[in-house]
Amino acid sequence: MARTLRVFDTDPNARPKTFASDFVGRFRAGQQLNGRPHALKAWRITTGDPEVGKAVAALYGGTPQSWETTKEDSTEVLTEANTVKVIVDGPDAVTFRMALYGMTGKPIHACDGVEFTDSEDPRHGQPCGCPQTLQERKAAAKNGHGPKPDQRLEFRLADDPELGKFRLMTGSWDFMKSLEGMWRELEAVGGPALCSLSLELVEFTTKSGVDVAYRKPVLKVHGPAPADVASAVPSLKAAADSAPF
């Protein structure tokens, strides 16, 4: 049976908030406006901890505000920063899979592009049947028939590593193309690496003459993190969190 302090029953607003996430916040490259996705020029950070919201706003601009979500990261900050220095604790902090999500919000197809990878899937280890060419993979994903990149990056802020871990989740095909080089560079560092996480502008004209512009997440590895930053210990509140949102 869970124990509670009844002293807060008469003043529930004073009860310390608890959050279920391993991560104190999430970096996002866009938002929903009138029910439609909208790309941003600077990072949007969401969190379930108002104090983290205040801290990132002080670092990168913007104002903490609430937004409509069913998840616990109900505070968002539309920052003014399109590049943030971060600490990445090695190549294992960057994960990749191809995934197609169902109506329940859980993946109905998870693979590495060749075989099914979900250990709870009876098809685990069997050929996934995905198209062979990248162009065909993109077309299948766009039509909702095939998986797309499902990539996670875990990091701390170089400007305030004690805040705890943040996460970026991205389906960017461009990010996928950079993964192998990224893993090699992080492996070469051999420990916590100082990196830049940016929203980089991409502009080009198609063969039919259509101008296209979008922003992609880019992680650049600079080298070993400074010793004082790499050894910073997250706050007790951040360390007490226990499941990803």
Image: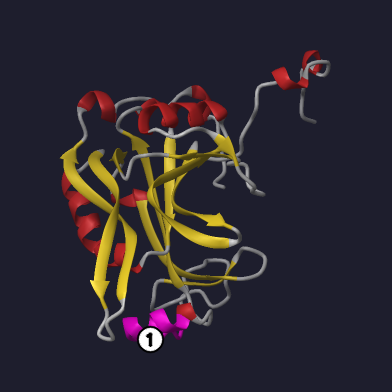
- Relative to 219, 32 lies left or right: right
In the image, the segment drawn in magenta is 127-140
User: Which residue shows up at 70% across the image and 17% down it?
Assistant: 14
Q: Is residue 4 visible?
A: yes
The amino acid marked with disc number 1 is Glu
Q: In the picture, residue 172 is in which quadrant?
A: bottom left
Q: Which residue is mark 1?
A: 136
Q: Is residue 198 above or below residue 212?
A: above
Residue 101 is situated, as x and y percent measured from the top left of the image, at: 57, 69
User: Which residue shows up at 18% across the image and 37% down it?
Assistant: 224
Q: Does the magenta-highlighted stretch encompass residue 125?
A: no
Neighbor class of circle 1 (other Cα within 10 Å; few <14, some 14-19, many 20+) is few
Q: Is residue 134 above or below residue 88?
A: below
Residue 116 is situated, as x and y percent measured from the top left of the image, at: 47, 75
Q: Is residue 85 above or below residue 52?
A: below
Q: In what element is the residue under mark 1?
A: helix
- Relative to 21, 214 lies left or right: left
- Relative to 118, 5 lies left or right: right
